[in-house]
Amino acid sequence: MYKIFDTVDEVSHYTAQRLLDKIKALPSAVLGLATGSTMEPVYAQLIKYIQHAPLDLSRLTTFNLDEYIGLSAQHPQSYNYYMYQHLFNQLNIPAQNVHLPDGLTTDIEATCQAYSQAISKRGGLDLQLLGIGTNGHIGFNEPKTCFNSRTHVVELSEQTRIDNGRFFSDQAEVPTHAVTMGIQDILEAKEVILVATGKNKADIMAKLFNSPIDEELPASALKKHNNLTIVLDREAAALLPQHTLKSAI
Ligand code: GLP
């Protein structure tokens, strides 16, 4: 299902409300969380909702999608740092319920295996929030990633390193590798919300709309999912066929 809004603000309200509804309906929910600039206003809105009408978050569990390899939790560009800055510092989720892949682990294989297992042990993800890369990556699952993948190490594509270079002072500082939840982990979530905003996402959203399910386009795996919502602003939706736009508003 597509939901298309005029502004980023409306996208953020809608998405934050969906997260809130999930937590209210299921206080022990397991949420899969994403990073990136798209999520910043979503998390800001969620914090506002919860500050306005406090909720018990003591039973909530979160698993983040991904993390750069080689960046510590204190590094301002690590996803761990991002999550505390934009969400966790403002919400009362017990620390032991918050999970992010460890980008500094010395045993990456064991870390990856344990991460997917930890998700399963908690009964799987109730809701997975996703952004999308301009090359169609979800999490850090780059083009050609197997759709049956579990948490694994990826070599970041040149496109992703260029896109994410805007957050680093020097392009050479962008890590070359990352650890990411696999596509199978994502597909097993009971509900998925993919959010894209801005004109730099218009091409990939049109490509995704027209694409068959194909490992060249990681986000196309989501077409197999039976509870997927794609939330876009007008700019990201600009190249979708007119009839989709009309029925999605
Ligand atoms: C990174 C993350 C993705 C995210 C993507 C888009 O590469 N690993 O999970 O979806 O960026 O980010 P943005 O929202 O900044 O466009």
Image (cartoon, rainbow, N blue to C red):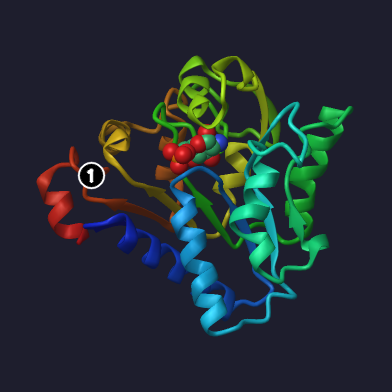
Towards the viewer: 188 or 231:
231
Q: Secondary structure at mark 1?
A: loop
Would residue 43 appear left or right of 200 to someone viewing this image?
right
Residue placed under numbered mark 1 in the picture: 235
On screen, residue 86 above or below 157: below
Would residue 205 appear left or right of 26 to someone viewing this image?
left
Residue at 66% of width from left, 22% of height from top?
177
The location of residue 143, given as percent across then percent down, is 48, 23
The location of residue 165, given as percent across then percent down, is 51, 24
Would residue 193 appear left or right of 172 to someone viewing this image?
left
Would residue 24 appear left or right of 230 to someone viewing this image?
right
The location of residue 71, given as percent across then percent down, is 74, 31
Could you tell me if residue 19 is visible in this image?
Answer: no
Residue at 25% of width from left, 35% of height from top?
206
Viewport quadrant of the C terminus = bottom left
Residue at 41% of width from left, 36% of height from top?
220
Residue 2 lies in quadrant: bottom left
Query: What's the amino acid at mark 1?
Result: Glu
The location of residue 19, given as percent across then percent down, is 51, 67
- As drawn, the residue found furthest toward the right would be 106
On screen, residue 92 above or below 178: below
